[in-house]
Image (cartoon, grey):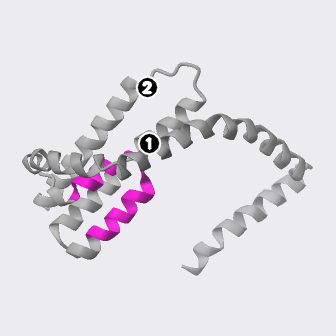
């Protein structure tokens, strides 16, 4: 494990040596890159702010809890434990919120339980769709969001179902 800790410093050293040999002005290149990044950050910020506010509003309004309890029977029918329904619903919105939920599930049910294994599979197989969409579509001229987000959510949900099925079989 000690050698892995040296990977990043070694990479930086190799970069500096490469720049020295090629006579590249590394600091100037770095500052030019930062100048190009500022407009990108400014164009992405409104989308990220909206997504984060909507995600928090979804949780605080009670809509998340109501939706979780309403969908629990359907999830049970599809092989998803109702105990992880909130995780399945939150993961497309918030990575940090779903990490906290996963920690709670692991603490409550134990790491080796079926519910915890399904929660880990759901966490690992799903993605924060709305965060990625906000970042991706901020740079696109065409803002047709319905089709890609629908496909991404369907893929996420399908992977959760398959992950829970595999947890049951294995």
- Which of these two is toward me, 86 or 155? 86
Mark 2 residue element: loop
Q: Secondary structure at mark 1?
A: helix
Instruction: Categorize mark 1 by other alpha carbons within 10 Å: few (<14), some (14-19), many (20+).
Output: few
Number of the label disc, if any, that sits on residue 145: 2
The reply to whether the C-beta atoms of the residues labelled 1 and 2 are less than 8 Å apart is no
Pinpoint residue 59: horizontal percent, then vertical percent: 36, 51
Label 2 Cα crowd, 10 Å radius (few <14 / some 14-19 / many 20+):
few
Between 63 and 108, the one lying in front of the other is: 63
Relative horizontal placement of residue 78, taking residue 123 as reference (left or right): left
The segment highlighted magenta reads: 84-105
Task: Indicate whether 81 appears above or below 143.
Answer: below
> For the point 88% across and 52% down, which residue is it?
27
Q: Is residue 91 among what the camera can see?
A: no
Left or right for 80, reference 119: left
Which percent across, then down, holds residue 17? 83, 60
Image mark for residue 54? 1
148 displayed left or right of 107: right
Q: In the depicted view, which residue is nearer to us: 9 or 107?
A: 107
Earlier sequence position, callout 1 versus callout 2: 1
Query: Mark number for residue 83?
Result: none
Q: Is residue 37 shown in magenta?
A: no
* Residue at 38% from the left image edge and 65% from the top image edge: 100
Residue 147 figure quarter = top left
Residue in the image at 70% along x and 62% along y: 11
């Amino acid at each position: 494990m000690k050698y892995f800790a040296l990977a990043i410093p070694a990479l930086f050293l190799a970069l500096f040596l490469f720049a020295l040999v090629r006579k590249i002005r590394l600091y100037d290149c770095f500052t030019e890159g930062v100048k190009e990044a500022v407009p990108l950050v400014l164009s992405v910020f409104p989308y990220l702010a909206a997504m984060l506010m909507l995600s928090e509003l979804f949780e605080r309004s009670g809509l998340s809890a109501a939706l979780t309890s309403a969908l629990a029977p359907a999830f049970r029918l599809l092989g998803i434990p109702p105990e992880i329904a909130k995780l399945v619903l939150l993961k497309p919105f918030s990575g940090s919120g779903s990490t906290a939920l996963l920690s709670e599930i692991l603490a409550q049910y134990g790491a080796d339980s079926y519910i915890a294994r399904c929660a880990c599979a759901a966490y690992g197989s799903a993605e924060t769709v709305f965060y990625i969409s906000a970042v991706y579509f901020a740079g696109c001229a065409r803002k047709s969001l319905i089709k890609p987000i629908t496909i991404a959510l369907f893929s996420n949900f399908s992977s959760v179902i398959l992950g829970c099925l595999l947890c049951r079989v294995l």
